[in-house]
């Protein structure tokens, strides 16, 4: 035997009991409904944030690689210049 819970009649019964007995009840009902919506949306937002991955900065890898290559080339060129200067100094000293 399947038991069906009918939410709509329960809602209308609850609504009629509050609003019909007390005219100020509609204000309480609206405030309560808004508060329930706010809590529901807050819970949904918290769940979304907890499951989302942190955003990472996108860096241009090709630019980084070209910068590294340029720096490596500068270092190699300066080493070659220093070696050539040292060899030239040795040659100059040997001639004297």
Image (cartoon, helix red, strand yellow):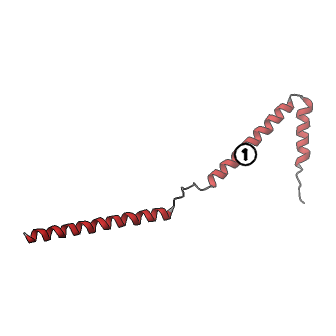
Above/below status of 38 relative to 85: above
For label 1, the crowd category at 10 Å Cα-Cα, with few meaning under 14, some 14 to 19 and many 20 or more, is few
Mark 1, residue position: 41
Residue 26 appears left or right of 83? right
Q: Above or below — where is 46 with respect to 82?
A: above
Identified at 69% across, 47% down, the residue is 43
Counting from the top left corner in percent of width and height, residue 44 is at: 70, 49
**Outermost residue, left direction?**
96
Residue 49 image point, x, y percent: 63, 51
Residue nearest the observer in this picture, 23 or 68 = 68
Image position of 87 with respect to 40: above or below: below
The structure residue drawn at horizontal position 27% and vertical position 69%, both measured from the top left corner, is 80
Quarter holding the N terminus?
bottom right
Indicate the position of residue 66 as horizontal and vertical percent values.
Answer: 44, 65
Secondary structure, mark 1, is helix
- Report the front residue among 58 and 36: 58
Query: Residue placed at 59% from the left, 56% from the top?
Result: 53
**Vertical arrangement, residue 30 with respect to residue 83, above or below:** above
Residue 20 point in image, percent of width and height: 92, 32
């Amino acid at each position: 035997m399947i038991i069906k819970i009918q939410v709509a009649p329960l809602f209308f019964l609850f609504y009629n009991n509050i609003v019909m007995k007390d005219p100020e009840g509609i204000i309480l009902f609206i405030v309560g409904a808004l508060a329930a919506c706010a809590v529901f949306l807050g819970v949904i937002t918290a769940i979304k944030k907890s499951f989302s991955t942190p955003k990472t900065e996108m860096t241009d890898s090709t630019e980084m690689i070209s910068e590294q290559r340029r720096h490596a080339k500068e270092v190699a060129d300066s080493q070659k210049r220093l070696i050539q200067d040292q060899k030239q100094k040795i040659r100059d000293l040997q001639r004297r």
